[in-house]
Image (cartoon, rainbow, N blue to C red):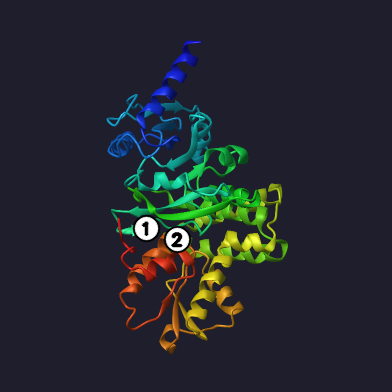
Amino acid sequence: MPQTRALCARRATLRVSGDEGTDVITYVLPTHERHDRLASTLRAIGDLGPHREVGGAEVIIVDNASPTPAVAPGALTSGVFVRVIRLETNEGAAARNAGVEASDPSSDWVVMLDDDSHPVGTRFLSALSSRSSEVAAVMADIRLPRLGTREAGGLPEVFIGCGVAIRRSAFLEMGGYDRSFNYYVEEYDLAARLLLAGYRVEFDPAFRIDHAKDVTNRDMNEILRRLVRNNGWVVQRYAPEDQRRAELREVRGRYRSIARKEGALDGFGRGLVELRRTFRAQRRTPFPRGLYERFTGKAHALEALEAERRQCPFHTAAVVEPGKNAWVVREALAELGVREVDATDDPEVLVIGTMSPGPMIDAAERWSGRSDRWRVAAPWRVVGELMRRPMRLGAA
């Protein structure tokens, strides 16, 4: 009974802390033995204020079995409440599940962070309430201030876990993150299940996250092991049968190349062995063709490039700065009857060759200054619109 009264009192205070909105926002961030980094992130969230755009906010820290338990104040300087949940084992990204399950039921949206990422401003909060009920997740523009670039990874309808707002009811409906992934590619699996359930994922350029990503002391062999295994699992689970083998070859080729570059062929090999051992245990729920093209980004590439061609027809294109799912861009061009040529062969248009939002926007910023010499197209309508409004590119 005392615990129930305390919880009710906390919820009542959450409501009072926001004068204008009605829905509480919950921030969920897992952490493991990075106490200084966590403290810095909490200060940054505190600097955002009491979240009057909505009905208040709470922060739930999920301690992934740190040898020295994480500690935090009961409330930030802004009055935003903080709770720490300690797990007995390190569950990786799936630690977020415990945070969402413990969140205030009046939270319509849960903002997923890492212990080294935080929002820049709160303008995005008021826009969440106006999203269609079909939208289950809103991706942020995730910046890496130390590197001067954006976070890599993700696709037009696949978010990155350190900067996304997810509808609480949809997250719980899906059962959260699959624990077997640990870290890496777990967002692809959850995004796939959301799309199969009829939801959509959107991007909001006004939703900015700064990620103080530390790339030192990373075990690249362990990272490559998980990337190969987990990407293979996603293909096996969701790829249509007539595309499954080609996608698996793409996964092997992409990560073999990365492993060579990073000196992590041992981890790549271990990942392949583990993938083969666990491959048939992955339950197949293949996408219908059209939905799979949304998932891979091909539907978005076809839409954007067809619109670009209607505006001003072109018959040749060079793919520049190829990255994540560059094959999607090339397939879209081929289906539209556009011949791919080398950039030195005087193409009519240069097409950015990645479907990963962050690198695509970065490339758009680099190429937008050369518009007098080159006609440049982005394979995603969202970035194409930003390129036509250059004041938005690079804006805080």
Instruction: Identify which amino acid the numbered label 2 is placed on.
Output: Pro
The disc label shown at residue 268, or none: none
| Residue count near mark 2 (Cα–Cα under 10 Å), binned few <14, some 14–19, many ≥20 | many
Q: Which residue is drawn at 37% across and 40% down?
A: 53
Q: Is residue 296 left or right of residue 308?
A: right
Secondary-structure class at tag 2: helix
The furthest residue to the bottom: 345
Spot occupied by residue 340 in the image (x, y as percentages of width and height):
52, 82
Q: Is residue 394 left or right of residue 377?
A: left
* Residue that badge 1 annotates: 150
Taking depth in this image into account, of 131 and 362 the one nearest to the observer is 131
Q: Residue at x 44, y 32 (%)?
A: 62
Secondary-structure class at tag 1: strand
Rendered view: 231 above or below 173: below
Spot occupied by residue 16 in the image (x, y as percentages of width and height):
37, 27
Contact between labelled residues 2 and 1, with CB atoms less than 8 Å apart: yes
Residue 274 can be seen, yes or no: no
The furthest residue to the front: 20
**First of labels 1, 2 by sequence position:** 1
Spot occupied by residue 145 in the image (x, y as percentages of width and height):
29, 53
Instruction: Identify which amino acid the numbered label 1 is placed on.
Output: Arg
Q: Residue at x 70, y 52 (%)?
A: 285
Q: Quadrant of residue 345?
A: bottom left
Taking depth in this image into account, of 380 and 83 the one nearest to the observer is 380
* Residue that badge 2 annotates: 357
Taking depth in this image into account, of 343 and 210 the one nearest to the observer is 210
Q: Is residue 316 left or right of residue 363?
A: right
Q: Quadrant of residue 114?
A: top left
If the image is split into quadrants, where does the C terminus sit? bottom left
